[in-house]
Amino acid sequence: MSYDPDNVFAKILRGELPCKKVHETEHALAFHDINPLTPVHVLVIPKGAYTDFADFTANAGPEEICGFWQAVHDVARMTGVEDSGFRIVANKGADAGQIVFHFHVHVFGGRPVSGSMVRPARD
Ligand code: 5GP
């Protein structure tokens, strides 16, 4: 899949759509999810144009990858969930339910999130 520069996260990165910013670094932007599923539900996105986890991991440079994951850790610390615990999720593709095709990681926390967040598989 090619990257669509008009996806909503690209528009947020360009300042064309608003967001509730949590954190910004050279390599990443973090903001509250518009439809939070947990008390802390923050999305972390790289500044580069990557459709999903596989595209990012295959094509981003080592500094981008390292800077991105450091920003994810920053968000856990800054939102106060580092000690209580948190879950990080990256949906990739249709079966995972990805709806925005700019790579992003969800940071879920602020309440127990240890149960399954997906339906059990059927035969
Ligand atoms: P995924 O692609 O991993 O399934 O999820 C995309 C996430 O982006 C969803 O949790 C959805 O609520 C969130 N989202 C979609 N559009 C916007 C938006 O315009 N602003 C923000 N802050 N979040 C959004």
Image: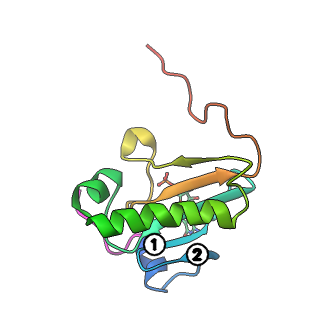
Specify the principal SS of the magenta part. Answer: loop
- Quadrant of the image containing the C terminus: top left
- For the record, the magenta segment spans 1-7
Q: Nearer the viewer, residue 27 or 19?
A: 27
Q: In the displayed structure, would residue 111 be above or below residue 29?
A: above
Q: Is residue 6 magenta?
A: yes
Q: Give x and y (percent) for residue 121.
A: 49, 21
Q: Which residue is mark 2?
A: 23
Q: Residue furthest bottom?
A: 15
Is residue 106 left or right of 47 when viewed as pictured?
Answer: right
Q: Is residue 99 magenta?
A: no
Residue at x 58% of width, y 66% of height: 74
Q: Give x and y (percent) for residue 49.
A: 31, 70
Mark 1: secondary structure:
strand
Q: In the displayed structure, would residue 28 be above or below residue 85?
A: below
Mark 2: secondary structure:
strand
Is residue 93 left or right of 90 when viewed as pictured?
Answer: left
Circle on res. 102: none
Q: Are marks 1 and 2 in contact (CB under 8 Å)?
A: yes
Q: Which residue is mark 1?
A: 28
Residue at x 48% of width, y 85% of height: 16
- Total marks in image: 2
Residue at x 42% of width, y 80% of height: 26
| Colour pattern of the rendering | rainbow
Q: Nearer the viewer, residue 16 or 45?
A: 45
Residue at x 60% of width, y 36% of height: 117
Residue 57 in view in this figure: yes
Q: Give x and y (percent) for residue 81.
A: 71, 55
Q: Quadrant of residue 119?
A: top right
